[in-house]
Amino acid sequence: KSLSHKTKIRLYKSIVIPVLLYGSETWTLNKKEEKKLIVFENKVLRKIYGPTYDQEEWRRKLNREIRDLYNSADIVSEIKSRRLRWPGQVLRREEESRLKVICKINPEGRRPHGRPKLIWWD
């Protein structure tokens, strides 16, 4: 309670976001998972910014009010931008890099039934 909103947002961006998004470059998210991430982010931001005093009563801030206060891209947009940067990072690695070798492999045969609809490269 004694920390300012600015300090709380700095802590959120420097501690919570990196832990939450670790490895997100390779995630394949569906709409349900995206919704869960947005709900989590809204809950955290609502906790940081707190309620508002409006017409002589306290009320929860609306999601759009929280977005206006936060002034940053939402968490799903951050994941999508990281996924777009990831192939470039892989391609810039040395030719002997395990990651680059694995990405260049073209497996033969068919995929088994029940596979994910997308792969991380998509």
Image: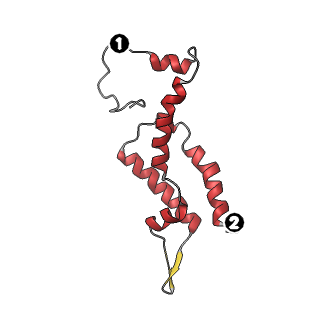
For numbered disc 2, what is the local secondary structure? loop
94 or 51: nearer the eye? 94
Asked if residue 87 lies left or right of residue 10, the reply is: left
Q: Mark 1 points at which residue?
A: 108
Question: x and y percent of residue 42 in the render?
Answer: 49, 59
Q: In which quarter of the image is the N terminus?
A: bottom right
Disc 2 crowd rating (10 Å Cα; few below 14, some 14-19, many 20+) is: few
**Residue in view at x 58 percent, y 64 percent:** 48
Disc 1 crowd rating (10 Å Cα; few below 14, some 14-19, many 20+) is: few
Q: In which quarter of the image is the C terminus?
A: top left
- Which quarter of the figure has residue 12? bottom right
Q: Which mark is residue 13?
A: none
**Residue in view at x 41 percent, y 48 percent:** 34
Q: What is the residue that sits farthest to the bottom in this orientation?
A: 56
Question: x and y percent of residue 37 in the render?
Answer: 46, 50
- Give how far apart the Cα atoms at labels 1 and 2 are: 57 Å
Q: Name the residue under label 2.
A: 3
